[in-house]
Image: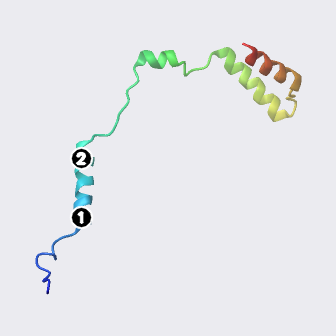
Amino acid sequence: MKINPSNLFGINPYKKQSEKIEQASKKNPQDQIHISSEAKKLQGNEPSPERLEKLEKLKQQINSGTYEINGKEIAKSIVDFYKK
């Protein structure tokens, strides 16, 4: 029995798959997020002046090499945190 390859020259199974992917991407718009101005205020992006002053002092101590780490205080604060 002889099988003639008729009408098989125009078939590309991968092309159909790529067309489906392209159609799906056209139908689904990209996700977007909008944050209201009230939510931005609640987020508190701007640190307080006291916090900025404290950070500046810490930066100066680190740069000058005078910043010291107290391991006992750190351990105590960790223990206190997990006792809550």
* Quarter assignment of residue 9: bottom left
Crowding at mark 2 (Cα within 10 Å: few <14, some 14-19, many 20+): few
Q: Quadrant of residue 81?
A: top right
- Element type at mark 2: helix
In the displayed structure, 84 sits above or below 62; it is above
Q: Is residue 70 left or right of residue 27?
A: right
Question: Which residue corresponds to mark 2?
Answer: 26
Residue denoted by label 1 = 15
Towards the viewer: 71 or 35 = 71
Horizontal and vertical percent position of residue 67: 85, 29
Q: Secondary structure at mark 1?
A: helix
Image coordinates of residue 55 in percent, x first then y, are 72, 24
Find the residue positioned furthest to the bottom. 2
The quarter of the rendered structure image containing the C terminus is top right
Left or right of 17 on screen, residue 31: right
Task: Tell me if 61 is positioned left or right of 31 in this view.
Answer: right
Observer-nearest of 45 and 49: 45
Looking at the image, the residue that sits furthest to the top is 84
Mark 1–mark 2 contact, CB under 8 Å?
Answer: no
Residue at (18%, 70%) from the top-left corner? Answer: 11
- Asked whether residue 37 appears in the rendered view, the answer is yes
CA–CA distance between discs 1 and 2? 17 Å
Relative depth, front residue between 80 and 5: 5
The correct choice, above or below, for 18 with respect to 79 in the image is below
Give amino acid for label 2. Answer: Lys
Q: Residue at x 48, y 16 (%)?
A: 41
The picture quadrant where one finds residue 82 is top right
Name the residue nearer the viewer: 18 or 52: 18
Q: Please name which of the two marks, 1 or 2, marks the residue nearer to the observer.
A: 1
Of the numbered discs 1 and 2, the one sitting upstream in the chain is 1
The three-letter amino acid code for the residue at tag 1 is: Lys
Residue in view at x 83 percent, y 19 percent = 76
